[in-house]
Image (cartoon, rainbow, N blue to C red):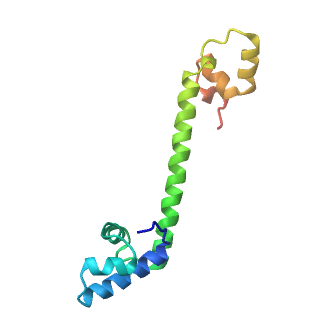
Amino acid sequence: MARKRFSAEQIIAKLREADAMLSGGASVGQVCPRLEVSEQTLSRWRSRYDGMKSGEARRFKELEQENARLKRIVADQALVGHHAAQGPERGKMVRPTRRREAVAYPREACYHARFAASTAYPFG
């Protein structure tokens, strides 16, 4: 079978059509070729979309996409934090240029001076 991508609404329509055929007495082996999907795909769709309406499925897809986007952001932030902690700029500030750069960002200066940022920013 050729690989196709179906929207959430199309999947729900195909599931309803499959349920109608199955309740009419057709077997899963007969239904899948008519729907142009494999048995595994039909099973996966049932586990994911069974009982949903098309509006709910659309919202479900949007939430999955947003969740993936947020996971990427969290992973990027963790990676940046890890590299910042491991990078060579996090050692002693020996060079004057490094000291000036650190003071340009007061929170970073607090980190290098080894005291809490709340002392530099008492109100926020």
The C terminus lies in which quarter of the figure? top right
Q: Is residue 14 left or right of residue 59?
A: left
Of residues 25 and 97, the one nearer the viewer is 25
Of residues 111 and 60, the one nearer the viewer is 60
- Quadrant of residue 22 within the rendered picture: bottom left
Percent x, y of residue 28: 26, 78
- Quadrant of residue 110 within the rendered picture: top right
Q: Is residue 21 above or below residue 113?
A: below
- Image point (23%, 88%), residue name: 25
- Image point (33%, 76%), residue name: 32
Q: Is residue 28 left or right of residue 117?
A: left
Q: Is residue 118 above or below residue 4?
A: above
- Most distant residue in the top direction: 94
The N terminus lies in which quarter of the figure? bottom left
Percent x, y of residue 102: 71, 21
Of residues 122 and 2, the one nearer the viewer is 2
Percent x, y of residue 63: 50, 62
- Most distant residue in the bottom direction: 24
Q: Is residue 96 above or below residue 31?
A: above
- Quadrant of residue 86 within the rendered picture: top right
